[in-house]
Amino acid sequence: MRVVFMGTPEFSVPVLEALVEAGHEIAAVYCQPPRRSGRGKKERPTPVHARALEMGLDVRHPVSLKGVEEQAEFAALGADVAVVVAYGLLLPQPVLDAPKYGCLNIHASLLPRWRGAAPIHRAIMAGDAQTGVCIMQMEAGLDTGPVLLRKTTEIGTEEVTSELHDRLSEMGAALIVEALERLPELTPQKQPADGVTYAHKIDKAEAAIDWQAPAAEVDRKIRGLSPFPGAFVEIEGVRIKLLGSRLVEGNGVPGEILDDRLTVACGSGAVQLLRLQRAGKGAQDATEFLRGMPLPKGTRL
């Protein structure tokens, strides 16, 4: 098929690669404009932008698609379908209507659960046992369109958002290739009205750990916010990101370190910290972290 690809972050890159490998013609790649970042605040292309250039594809990064000129340029591509995955811009109705088969979105949840911006984080933070990927026919509402295909996966008990992110990205890439192969025969299934939840954008204010909370809640927050923005505590004025954990047995004063393996008491139960990061340093496994910053038994976080 002749495909317009629309995506921006690293999550979208395997999907673009899979479409090219499957033999689809990429009419154009749409992504967010380069942003200034890093030392010197140089403009840096997004992951999709950089990969598309490496593949020799036509890249476009309009600030908006609301203008008549941008919509006309999109329609002029004569696409059979647009594949959209974490693009970051709202698609006006003329854009949704332009391709022959419309616009298909790859969404990293089991719709209608976790519509919105942060479905992977929210699934882990809520303690969901399963999540998955849906191929959805896009319409004007936020992730409200009918679903063409879905695939389910278990969430590991120690899995963090970055790991689940990578698995779902690969699943989405395989599923969209299947969807395009079977597109004429697929019947869109309307999303049920029951079970709708919204995965609101992650706010950095959520990242502070409250050790008074039950261990299961603390563990889910640590894993759900890893690696970004990273759940954190402060010790003697130093901010420490907590990037990995597991539930373990233990009781004590909330926030108290119970042993030499970074087991920390919570409001009920305990968690063992597996991966940490001091401000200005790289992420480290617990054993390595403790060599540089000892936290003996009895320390209060």
Image (spheres, rainbow, N blue to C red):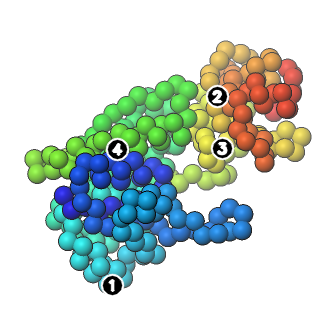
For the point 57% across and 51% down, which residue is it? Answer: 202
Q: For mark 1, give the secondary structure.
A: helix
- The answer to which quarter of the image holds residue 77 is bottom left
Q: Position of residue 239 (x, y in %)?
A: 79, 44
Looking at the rendered structure, the kind of residue marked 1 is Glu
The first of marks 4 and 1 along the sequence is 1
The answer, for residue 13, to whether it is visible in the render is: yes
Residue at the limit of the structure toward the left, as seen here? 185
Instruction: Indicate which disc, 3 or 4, sits on the residue closer to the N terminus.
Output: 4
Callout 4 secondary element:
helix
In the picture of the structure, the residue carrying the numbered disc 3 is 230
In the rendered structure, which amino acid carries the disc numbered 2?
Ser
Residue at numbered disc 2? 245
The picture places residue 42, in percent across and down from the top left corner, at 65, 69
Q: SS of the residue at dot 3?
A: loop
The answer to whether marks 4 and 2 mark residues whose Cβ atoms lie closer than 8 Å is no
Mark 2: few/some/many CA within 10 Å (<14, 14-19, 20+): many
* Residue 228: image location, x then y, percent: 61, 47
Lower position in the chain sequence, tag 3 or tag 1: 1
| Residue with the mark numbered 4 | 172
Tell me the number on the disc at residue 69.
1
Graded by Cα atoms within 10 Å as few (under 14), some (14 to 19) or many (20 or more), the crowding at tag 1 reads few
- Considering every residue shown, the one lying at the far bottom of the view is 69
